[in-house]
Amino acid sequence: MFIKIIGGQNMNIYERDILINLSKDQYINQRSLAQRTGHSLGTVNQTIKSLMRTGYIDELAMLTSKAQDEFKEKKPKRAIILAAGFGMRMVPINTETTKGLIEVNGEVLIERTIRQLHEVGITEIYVVVGFMKEQYEYLIDEFGVELIVNSEYATKNNLHSIKLAVDHLENAYIIPCDIWCRENPFSKYELYSWYMVSDLVDDESSVRVNRKMELVSVQKKLGGNSMVGICYLVKEDAEIVKQKIIELSKNRYYDDAFWEEALYKKDRMIVAAKVVHSVDVVEINTYEQLRELDSDSNQLKTDAIDVICNALDVKNDEISNISVLKKGMTNRSFLFECKEKKYIMRIPGEGTDQLINRQEEAEVYNCIRDKNICDDIAYINPDNGYKITEFLEGARVCDPLDEDDIKKCMKCLRNFHQKKLKVDHDFDLFGQIEFYEKLWNGKSSVYRDYLKTKRNVLDLKEYVQKNIEVKTLTHIDAVPDNFLFVDKDGKEDIRLIDWEYAGMQDPHVDIAMFCIYSLYDKTQVDHLIDIYFEDECKQSIRIKIYCYIAIAGLLWSNWCEYKRTLGIEFGEYSLRQYRYAKEYYRIVQEELRKLKEGREVIQNV
């Protein structure tokens, strides 16, 4: 690879490396220079002659003013540290500490990085924060950094973090916050742009280093150099990257993209490779990587791990293969193995202590524990909601658009309702609407006609109460994602999971909940009702289920409004719930009008 420099001259990678080395250490002889750079003696000999010929060093191998000017122009001036993300793979550590503040050998990761930058004279440091941003505030006073807040960290990847700092890319290091470097990777002297990779082969990498020290694209799963993520950009390349970042960030296709997308031109990066040994630079992505690097790290002593050890009678190092599951609307969960079995641990998410009574949830699980209805519970804490369940291998969730799936789910739901199980607490739909509203009260609803919609929904209460035939234990959250299809001894079985909201209620509420989570239209709603009731649903009950759809729509709309105050958005889901509240109120009114007209016709006859 060749890099363009001042005066129209080209400098190859050996010349750049040796010139940088000469700027750091006094020249003794070519043999010592070969040892320091790792290049052959012949390469060093040729390179020294070339640098003399082009005027970068004199006869004594001392830097000339031309070289000094080159170093001055490309000198590192600033750094951008990316620290906005969830660090989802760091479960369960990320439930208590953001990844940049993990301790390794008694030193906080991001503090170590900042100190290494200070050692080479870089004090202009920008830290892009988002998740747990408050935990980074102390860095302003401690190290004089500037925080840049990425409010979109939950929905967009770090390309959008870099966009917030594009005016600071010139002669800048870009650094992930979760990197541990044995030796200082930064320098007072740089001559070209580079991106750091390690000599470790990684199936997830999208680049490999060729013989010219270029970073060329490689398909994932084919193996490339592990991408460390530290990068240095000189002025010319910084401008290219800046324009590319701005362009890409306008395209929603790149919402989930890494910032490195801006480094590519066709099939390779526009910057050179900087290769390091994998033992010298470690990206700490998982609990187990941290444990391997520092088995005494304070972050390994999390509440979640302590619970697992006590509940399953295992030691910390017996817990392995920890991996994050999809982040749910309410909880964070992770998968782990111990004693040759797989388990899922649920950790309640933000604000759930306000939303869910864990004592009541534990009561429900005790009620259904031995009835082959739910997943197998290994541990549940009625105080904090921590729960451990056995992992159901090969399980899949219900497809709400698959006829066979929904028939099986409605049969499962009907069989559960027919057991007429009882617990000591109710789920009050109207009470919960008021409760969620109080949680976000103090801020007006995001919907301009909320008060009118609420009045309409509350008007449905009388009809509902007149048409409740029985109350029994009801799941409340009987949505497609909570029906698991599993193989049990060669036969398909269905398990209903996540009973956080369950309580005594009209079981027909569960039908409404399935509909609104599936975002069904009225035709699909009616079809599901027919399946559940095996084509024998009375019109009065059908209208009652329409009422429940309107009521549940407002209920979960208010739930989403509360979550919104916590910085959590649910996109289309929240909007559709509010639409259900309005549209199904109108549907109920229309159906009641038809019933009334039908009775009048009969009376007249």
Image (tube, rainbow, N blue to C red):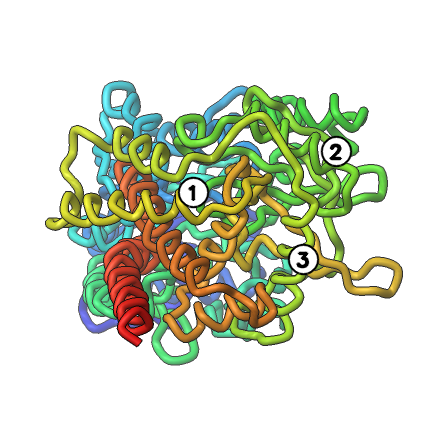
Q: In the image, what residue occupies the spot 32% across and 30% down?
A: 435
Identified at 79% across, 38% down, the residue is 370
Q: Which residue is denoted by mark 2 in the rendering?
A: 378
The answer to whether 190 appears left or right of 203 in the picture is left
Query: Circle 3 sits on which residue?
Result: 412
Asked if residue 266 lies left or right of residue 70, the reply is right
Quadrant location of residue 471?
top right
Q: Is residue 362 above or below residue 154?
A: above
Q: Is label 3 or label 1 in front? A: 3
Reading the image, the residue beneath label 1 is 86
Q: How packed is label 2: few (under 14 Cα within 10 Å), some, or many (20 or more)?
A: some
- How far is disc 1 from disc 2 in space, using C-alphas? 28 Å
Q: Position of residue 507 (x, y in %)?
A: 54, 48
Point out the residue furthest to the bottom here. 266
- The residue at the far left in this view is 448
Residue 515 sits in quarter: bottom left
Q: Earlier in the sequence, mark 3 or mark 1?
A: 1
* Element marked by disc 2: strand
- Neighbour class for label 1 at 10 Å: few (<14), some, many (≥20)? some
Closer to the chain start, of discs 1 and 2, is 1
Residue 380 lies left or right of residue 239; in this view the side is right
In terms of secondary structure, where does tag 3 sit?
helix
Q: Look at label 2 and name its amino acid.
A: Ala
Location of residue 419 in the rendering, given as x and y in whole percent from the top left corner: 70, 45
Q: Is residue 129 visible?
A: no
Mark 3 residue type: Cys
